[in-house]
Image (tube, rainbow, N blue to C red):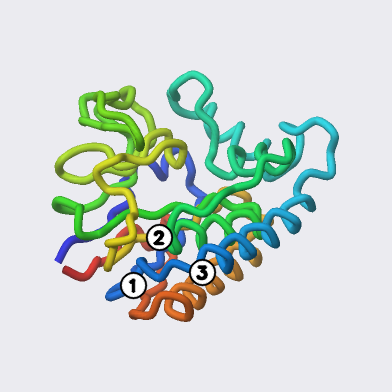
Amino acid sequence: MSRFIIEDDFWTLFPHAKIGIVICQGIDNSRRDVEKYEKLLQEAEKEAHKFLHLEEFSSNPVISVWREAFQKFKTKKGARCSIEALLKRVKNGNPIGTINPLVDIYNSISLRYGLPCGGEDIDTFVGDIRLTQAAGNEPFIPLGQDENASPYEGEIVYKDDVGAICRCWNWREAQRTMLTENTKNAFLCIELIDETRSDEFYMALKELSDFVPHHLGGMVKMEVLDIYHKEISIFG
């Protein structure tokens, strides 16, 4: 039985953070209905405009709070929170296309609630998963690439016993653990650092945990980790 553990070196930087986890088991991520998921994303993009009411893009609270967070650890130049990348596309009128059902679902939740969401294939994990500061020598092949790009020492990463699986907290995911249409068991997360948005965080997490079995079958388990609850078991 592997575990997801948030290490103390993370909590020293972000003592008030909450990490919401949805463990999905026995899903069918090959259910392709492109029109349905395109509509889901289009509706989410329309809703996302409510987070962009300030003319200066980086001044909008859902973006600025993560800009500030990324200044607390060493990051690759230009690295931005995943929600900023999605909202930048919305602002520029660049539609977010479908990838696969599970990714489309969490992207739609991310847009509707203005919170970073991500996911990995549990069956690719080796050992425990940790959210921690990187040693700086963890192997990491970025999504869509084939060359190693290890994190910096002290960079916030998700990693397992083999290497990093997401760099700069939620900026860039690994090729090795990406969700595909063959994914049966998934580890999904929603991250909160703005304490004033706790209600939206829990609503987003509940909606994500409802959406997945409704659209893809299987079973889900929902957990919230904080400084008082730092680890959970992952089935397997």
Quarter of the picture holding the N terminus: bottom left
Q: In this view, does 68 lie to the left or right of 130?
A: right
Disc 1 + disc 2, Cβ < 8 Å: no
At which x and y percent is residue 57? 75, 33
Give me the disc on residue 28. 1
Which disc, if any, is residue 208?
3
Rendered residue at 45%/28% (across/down): 73
Asked if residue 26 is positioned above or below residue 59 in the image, the reply reads: below
Kindly state the secondary structure of the residue where label 1 is placed. loop
C-alpha gap between disc 3 and disc 2? 9 Å
Q: Dot 2 surroundings within 10 Å: few (below 14), some, or many (20 or more)?
A: many
Q: Which residue is drawn at the image coordinates 29% and 42% (left, top)? A: 165
The amino acid type, in three-letter code, at marker 1 is Asp
- The percent position of residue 149, horizontal first and vertical second, equals 29, 24
Q: x, y percentage for residue 29?
A: 36, 67
Q: Nearer the viewer, mark 3 or mark 1?
A: 1
* Residue matched to label 2: 188
